[in-house]
Amino acid sequence: MDDATAVPSRFRAGWHPTNVGHLVMGVAFLGIVGIWALVVSETVTGEDIRWLLPIPWVVAGLAGLLVIAFSGRRRPAPQPAAVTTRAEEPQTEPETDDDDDNTRIIDTEENS
């Protein structure tokens, strides 16, 4: 493999970063499909349906929170950036020549 297609070493063991948004929406989708199946099969009817509808969103949210909480432990600690110091240079204002106007007038009534 060349350097352009090399896989970082922390991902070679089969681990890959989890996309939390995809996970949450996938869990919510499966939950809604499950509730739909219960309603279509008439296992759940009437007032019970309104109590089932929030369950996929709560479970999906908990799954997202758990992934965020536990996936942070596997990440290596960020390395501090190298600190470089420069000799302090005096701050000077850029020189301006107020007499020289480099503005180019494109359209005026005189040129028309």
Image: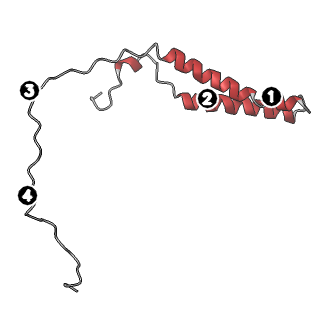
Residue marked by disc 2: 24
Residue marked by disc 4: 97
Measured as percent of width and height from the top left, residue 37 is found at 81, 33
Relative to the observer, which residue lies in front, 1 or 93? Answer: 93
Q: Nearer the viewer, mark 3 or mark 2?
A: 3
Label 3 secondary element: loop
Measured as percent of width and height from the top left, residue 3 is found at 27, 29
Q: Nearer the viewer, mark 1 or mark 3?
A: 3
Query: First in sequence: mark 1 or mark 3?
Result: 1
Query: First in sequence: mark 4 or mark 1?
Result: 1
Q: Residue at x 10, y 41 (%)?
A: 92
Residue marked by disc 3: 87
Marks 1 and 4: in contact by CB < 8 Å?
Answer: no
Residue marked by disc 1: 52
Label 1 secondary element: helix
Q: Quadrant of the C terminus?
A: bottom left
Report which quarter residue 53 is drawn in. top right
* Cα–Cα span, label 3 and label 4: 29 Å
